[in-house]
Image (cartoon, rainbow, N blue to C red):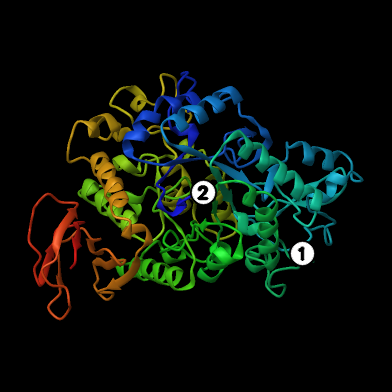
Amino acid sequence: MTNWKEKVIYQIWPRSFNDSNGDGIGDLVGIIEKLDYLKRLGIDLIWLSPVYLSSNKDYGYDIDDYYHINPEFGTMEDFDKLLEEAKLRGIGIIMDLVANHTSDQHEWFKKALDDPSSPYRDYYFFRKGKEGSPPNNWMSFFGGSSWTYDAKSKEYYLTQFTPNQCDLNWENVNMRQGIYDIMRFWLDKGIAGFRMDVINAISKDEELRDKDPDKKGLQFPAELTLNRPKTHTYLQEMNREVLSKYDCITIGEGALAGQEDVVRYTHPDSKELQMMFHFDLHMLGCGSLGRYDFRKLYRWRILDFKKVLISWQTEMQKQGGWIGSYLSNHDQRRQVSLFGDDKKFRRESAKALCLLNFTLRGTPFIYQGEEIGMVDCPLRQHEWRDYEAINAYEVLQQMMHVPAFIARSIIKKANRDNARTPMQWNAMKNAGFTTGKPWIKVNPNYMQLNAEDDEKHPESILTFYRDTIAFRKKHPVLTWGSFTSLCDAHKKAVVYIREDNKEKLFVLINMSNNHTKINFKNTNIKAPRLIYSTHKEERPFEEIMKLAPFEGRVYELN
């Protein structure tokens, strides 16, 4: 895709975006109804989380049929209409490609399960157990064993996420061609490209060896299933046989993908992907086992945040990698609740985070509701919908011996459902999301926090997002320019310069809920011109610069 680095991408979680028919579930027609809203926002592409036929064990990431639309979202005719209407507004549609696994209801897997001699058996990983136990000691991403037992054949099959998500065997050339056929089907329809779910997990250790065999209990396999050499072989083949033949955008997602991994996936010479997400910011304060590993008690400092941010910006620039820049999505908490202040300084911190994301090196992503400053939703245990959260509650008690009341507190903090509650359109019943009963709780703050209300106020978060998107597009240096970090030891502010041969912009953002000062006396920063800010006050630049809580400023340097 031409100039894909310049695009602004908006992620839609269809189930919670907009319900057109009153069944409590967002749908494709509902998205069509809001395309003008997205056009006014200034976005170029929509990343559509899965809308394929699914059993919804993991809400669309367990796919029964890649060639059909889930009826709860509409029909293929609705999808074609969405493509057409989006194109009329200059917006492309990115599909979510889930190529690491299918659901256990997919035709391939059902045939593999019914007949051990079927050629589809080798599309997956079926193995005999060891002494009445699974084939190895791998722990799944969601806790518990990575293996599910098939009583009929007395074998186990690999399921690294939910027990209903069956890992595909990428060693099988026919399976790979089946995935490539799926990709061609959607690209021929005219979609703009793919976001590829856990794409760094498609290659497994050939011998399916135990992880740390001397240790007791389940072990997370890490390097045995992630970022393996053959992953690059497969992605290069995918690029050669499919992606290179279309003008499309490719976005990879990969757990535990480090900087060297991301460079290798996204460097132009690799001929694999165009950009990749990383998770390091969202793992701040978590233990090595992820979001529900509470051993660090989710504590982190702004200096920790800065260290991760600066390291990724610097290394990607130095080594030729490219990232998708995001601060929230369907798998993470709401960014204002995680990185900002969702109480006293909600508006201020939402704007600061927006300014940060849109002035960094990388392609910026917005997650639905971010543009109006939506926050984590208070959910009780009976209101949880996410398999990972529900399963982790049991795992925390059984494997880590965490008391139930503490386990509930941990789940409440890290639950993916925090970001999956319905989009808050207005102050009407159910936030204007649906006329029926919503599939999940609506955040009760919708009376005070909604898009319609933001539309009325020129200083709103929504207005700031529109202005910031326009500001980024007006200043190509924010896409193509170099990144140089300043004031790395400052405990509250992020400070950096974006520069090319035409412009030099100086960005400073207070990431705290306190006033702060930054000393520029011994620097070359002299009398810059303010061109953009989160706050309205036109304060001149000073050698000792004072910033209000979550205040951000962009200056032009001569």
Residue that numbered label 2 is attached to: 1
Q: Position of residue 504 (x, y in %)?
A: 25, 66
Residue marked by disc 1: 208
Residue type pointed to by label 1: Leu
Mark number displayed over residue 424: none
Q: Image point 36% across, 29% down: which residue?
A: 36
Q: Is residue 259 above or below residue 409?
A: below
Residue 243, position as x, y percentages in the image: 63, 50
Say if mark 2 contacts mark 1, CB within 8 Å: no
In the rendered view, does 39 fall on the left or right side of 60?
A: left
Picture residue at 76% right of the left edge, 53% below the top: 169
Along the viewing direction, whichever of 156 and 355 lies nearer the viewer: 355
Three-letter amino acid code at the position of disc 2: Met
Can residue 129 be spotted in the picture? yes
- As displayed, is residue 541 above or below residue 183? below
Calculate the distance from the C-alpha at mark 2 to the C-alpha at mark 1. 38 Å
Identify which residue is drawn at 49% across, 20% down.
23
Residue 386 percent across, percent down from the top left: 53, 42
Mark 2: give few (<14), some (14-19) or many (20+) Cα within 10 Å: few
Q: Residue furthest right?
A: 117
Label 1: element kind = loop
Residue 213: which quarter of the image? bottom right
